[in-house]
Amino acid sequence: MGSTLALAYALEHRGAVSELVLTAVTSGSRAEIDWISDGVGVLFPEAHERLTAGGVARERVIESFARRLRDPDPAVRAAAAVAWEEWETTHVSLDPGFTPGPMFDDDRTRENFATLVTHYWAHDCFLPAGRSVLDRVGELATIPAVLIHGRHDVSSPVATAWRLHRAWPASRLHIVETEGHGGPKEMELARAAIDGFLPAL
């Protein structure tokens, strides 16, 4: 989500952006949203079954959650927020040693996070229709960028970072072979990239 927001900002305010450092790269496409909220269920069928248990037939998973998280009944909202948090922590890593834990300690923060994410995704990240980030990346051709992505990131597959890099001459792509959706090596590369850009600011 963060990389999509950064790209959207850069596209609309190119004069205010000197360089970009992006990790866990996404473009906010509907295909990516449907993958992270539904498609990745092929890898986690048990968790996906729990996720979709309260949905309506033929309703997109993301729209189902956006609707339930706006329900006037606090119990409906709370149950949807817990289900969404469980789903988020399930697909964030393929590391066999990874133990998903709660993302948030309090109910209100959990519900706010789930509401924000699902509302944003249910509205296709509020990006202009027919003008995807990937289609417009040529507008950023001269802005230096470092793209950092984990090979094992099943939440946001590396294909988006690869396509973006191929269409962006001023970008460098680091694929971290041993990590998924974030990790210490990715953070180390991000810090190094930021430090490398600082002298130019």
Image (tube, grey):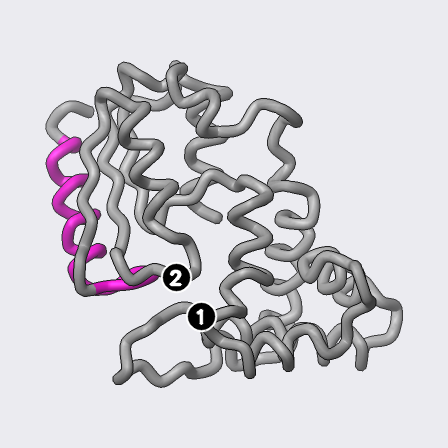
Residue 111, position as x, y percentages in the image: 65, 70
Amino acid beneath label 2: Val
> Can you tell which quarter of the image residue 192 is in?
top left
For the view shown, which residue lies furthest in the front direction?
Answer: 42
User: Image point 51% across, 48% down: which residue?
Assistant: 32
Amino acid beneath label 1: His
Mark 2–mark 1 Cα distance, whole angstroms, equals 7 Å
Dot 2 surroundings within 10 Å: few (below 14), some, or many (20 or more)?
A: some
In-image side of 71 versus 175 (left or right) = right
User: Image point 21% across, 56% down: which residue?
Assistant: 187
Label 2 sits on a secondary structure element that is loop
Dot 1 surroundings within 10 Å: few (below 14), some, or many (20 or more)?
A: many
Is 71 situated above or below 116?
A: below
Q: Is residue 141 among what the camera can see?
A: yes
Location of mark 1 (residue) = 91
Evaluate if marks 2 and 1 touch, with contact meaning CB atoms under 8 Å apart: yes
Location of mark 2 (residue) = 154
Of callouts 2 and 1, which one flags the residue occurring earlier in the amino acid sequence?
1
In-image side of 108 versus 75 (left or right) = left
User: Image point 63% across, 79% down: which residue?
Assistant: 49
Label 1 sits on a secondary structure element that is helix
| Range covered by the magenta-colored residues | 179-198
